[in-house]
Amino acid sequence: MTRPARAVLHASALRHNLDRVRAAVPHSRVMAVVKADGYGHGLAETVAALAAADAFAVASVEEGLRVRAAGATGPVVVLEGPFAADDLALARRERLDLVVHSPEQLQLLEQAGPGRGIGVWIKLDTGMHRLGFEPEAAAAVHRRLDRCPAVTAIGWLSHLACADTADAGPTRAQLETFHGALGGLPGPRSLANSAAVLRHPATHLDWVRPGIMLYGVSPFPDSTGPELGLQPAMGLHTRLIAVHRLPQGAAVGYGGAWVCPEPMPVGVAAIGYGDGYPRHAPSGTPVLVGDRPAALVGRVSMDMICLDLRQAPAARVGDEVTLWGGALPVEVLARHAGTIGYELLCSVTARVAREKA
Ligand SMILES: *Cc1c(COP(=O)(O)O)cnc(C)c1O
């Protein structure tokens, strides 16, 4: 196997970023969010690197089983809770804690027979209007779960819709709604995602749930991870497989969508949308060739992209190409491609080789 496209995982960056979270939340415990294969970084490697977290959080019971298989012995929280009764049985067997966000899930727990106890987190909808019980239902839901023989511990969580935006108003309102709904009800509380860890200390409460910042990527649209003291945990790299000297007027790639404005070197790098490089990245999107800046030209193909090498005139076949990582944060590519770092990290496909730094 010699295809040069590869994603390089920096485990030391994950550990550094967890320390950065700890420094920001000295009074809260940390639930490291590792859903979607550790945001595309590889679940087992991510769980191993973040072993010092107080808990892990995943989207589904399937993902929770994989966290256990990776060797995690502490709490594992399933953020969307059980999808059906068999999820409940698996969660009990593997000691996964379940979020309960709906009347259907509440019924599943009420119907569970005796057996190993299960920890639950009641999810309230404090304003995002995606998942969760109405705040007014908090006490009643708590009463019903408290009566379930299967339930041993109950916590509270909610999710913030706007913690990454400049306007703090919606976050403040959600926090107030959360406090108002819970009053003196017992149990640990959790509200903060990465953006709130960094910008909204009042939301830190008992447990924070950072995801993206652990991977060294900014949750905010106007900054990068390194600017926030984070270290990017993934680099996406490949190599040049051809370099051409094209004349003025030569059209490059599918549709001839980009035309050389002058005689110039154009490189071909072995990576494309079949690897998770975004097809919508436009001409001009920055790339590094070695440590020289280069720019995408023409349409992204499935397996290849073409590069303007005018600023890297000495570039040769075999030279390293960085799509993101190092001096090129994934947030920069995301901005050019009209998406967010989260999506790019999760989109790296299975055919891309994984390497440890
Ligand atoms: C994904 C997720 C998080 C983590 O969000 P980031 O923005 O990546 O920090 C936290 N809580 C819930 C419920 C989530 O689904």
Image (cartoon, grey):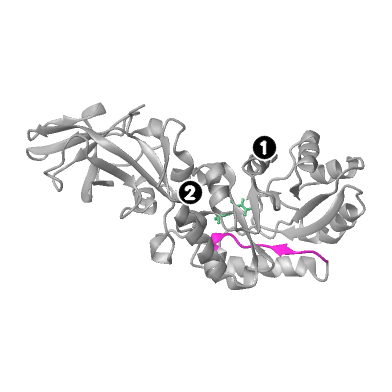
Q: Is residue 47 magenta?
A: no
Nearest to viewer (mark 2 / mark 1): 1
In this view, the residue in front, 357 or 57, is 357
Query: Where residue 150 sits: x, y (%)?
Result: 88, 47
Residue 192 placement, left or right of 86 = left
Question: What's under tag 1, amino acid-wise?
Answer: Glu
Badges 2 and 1: C-beta atoms under 8 Å apart? no
Q: From where the camera sits, is residue 260 visible?
A: no
Residue 111 placement, left or right of 9 = right
Q: Residue at x 39, y 65 (%)?
A: 227
Q: Residue at x 16, y 30 (%)?
A: 251
Crowding around mark 1 (Cα neighbors within 10 Å: few <14, some 14 to 19, many 20+) is few
Residue pointed to by mark 2: 342
Question: What's under tag 2, amino acid-wise?
Answer: Tyr
Query: Where residue 105 sits: x, y (%)?
Result: 80, 43
Is most of the magenta stretch helix, strand or loop? Answer: loop
The answer to whether residue 192 is above or below residue 282 is below
What is the quadrant of residue 124 in the picture? bottom right
Which label sits on residue 62?
Answer: 1
In terms of secondary structure, where does tag 2 sit? helix
In this view, the residue in front, 53 or 87, is 53
What is the quadrant of residue 316 in the picture? top left
Closer to the N terminus: mark 2 or mark 1? Answer: 1
Query: Where residue 260 sits: x, y (%)?
Result: 13, 37
Crowding around mark 2 (Cα neighbors within 10 Å: few <14, some 14 to 19, many 20+) is some
- Please report the bounds of the magenta region as a residue range: 186-195
Q: Is residue 188 magenta?
A: yes
